[in-house]
Amino acid sequence: MRLFIREQLPLLLFYAGQMMLIGLWYWLAVPDHAAFTVVYGALLSFALLLLYLAYRYYSQRKLYARLESSLAEMDQALGDLGETPMAAAVTDLLRHQFQMYKNELYDTRQKLDNHTAFINRWIHQMKTPVSVLQLTLQDLDIEDEAADGMQEEIDRLRKGLEMALYTSRLDKFEQDFKVESIPLRDAVEQAVAVNRQWFIRKGIYPEIRVPADLSIISDAKWLAFILGQVIVNAVNYSIEEGGKVVFIAYGQGPHTVLEIRDEGIGIAKEDLGRVFEPYFTGNQGRQYHESTGMGLFLVREVCLKLDHQIELESEPGEGTTVRFTFEK
């Protein structure tokens, strides 16, 4: 109703001005200045205007109701808006636009699916030469700094391919996860074992304080991924050899909390609010050229999809604590 009144307001103002001018002209033109005649004519004209406005509103009430209400779903705009020429024209326009939107959305999804399929195939193809390089390096049995450097670059390639693979899978997350009860200590130990070369290379020691009886509800594959990302960050940003990465877990009501604490360079206070943004590396992250700014972003996205909570606390020069909260 408000939209209808706003739309008809210019007509009402024009009508009021017209009545004033015609009434004045009639008052001056008629010798007897019959006020009753002027008022009667104005009231009659106003009554006709009200009948017109009532008909106008009644015939287009569906159109005004649709324009004044928000849409919960896209196809709600395609309902019948009335039989008037304006309502029919708006209905045809909305249907045409909705069809164009569906066509564009379909094309975009097809391109995205093709791109994701290409990325997945490319990543799996790249895993083969990386594995060949790993086996070749082991067969050479070289014990020097050059071999360590080659091994480090191979590990970086493997981690980069893993990150790219899991990034591409995020869009199809609903088709690629299985929720189950997972012993938390086993998950942490497996994540540490997979990343043991990073600990050895940096001279960092893992310390696991996770009770054996704690279990969480999660997806084993995605859980391993997020733990691996946090472990790599904790090791990479450690200040010196001999430091520790401590894994502490405890129950908290209906939840299980896992804290991963490192003794690294920490994060500046001005960067804490942005660490989960994609491609954000921060002041400390720029000191390390391999930092992509995607690790914590992907960890948070996976946690959101699995309904896990993640928090981060840090002090520059004192280390960082990443805290996960899981359902038991």
Image: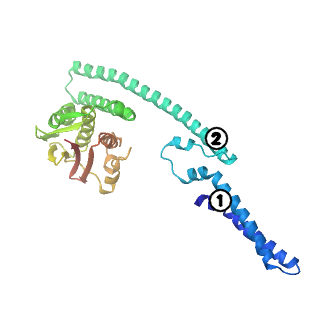
The quarter in which the N terminus is drawn is bottom right
The answer to which image quadrant residue 260 occupies is top left
Q: Residues within 10 Å of mark 2 (few under 14, many from 20)?
A: few
Q: Which mark is residue 43?
A: none
Query: Mark 1: which secondary structure?
Result: helix
Residue designated by label 2: 92
Q: CA distance from mark 1 to mark 2?
A: 22 Å
**Amino acid residing under circle 2:** Asp
Q: How many marks?
A: 2
The answer to which image quadrant residue 104 occupies is top right
Pinpoint residue 195: horizontal percent, then vertical percent: 22, 33
Pinpoint residue 144: horizontal percent, then vertical percent: 21, 28
Q: Nearer the viewer, residue 307 or 89?
A: 89
Q: Is residue 81 above or below residue 201?
A: below
Q: Residue at x 31, y 53 (%)?
A: 272
Q: Residue at x 68, y 59 (%)?
A: 53
**Amino acid residing under circle 1:** Glu
Q: Nearer the viewer, residue 206 or 81?
A: 81
Residue designated by label 1: 7
Q: Residue at x 49, y 29 (%)?
A: 110
Pinpoint residue 128: horizontal percent, then vertical percent: 33, 20
Query: Position of 9 compared to 135: left or right?
Result: right
Pinpoint residue 66: horizontal percent, then vertical percent: 56, 50
Q: Residues within 10 Å of mark 1 (few under 14, many from 20)?
A: few
Q: Are marks 1 and 2 in contact (CB under 8 Å)?
A: no
> Can residue 243 be seen in the rendering of this structure?
no
Q: Earlier in the sequence, mark 1 or mark 2?
A: 1
Q: Nearer the viewer, residue 155 or 49?
A: 49
Query: Mark 2: which secondary structure?
Result: helix
The quarter in which the C terminus is drawn is top left
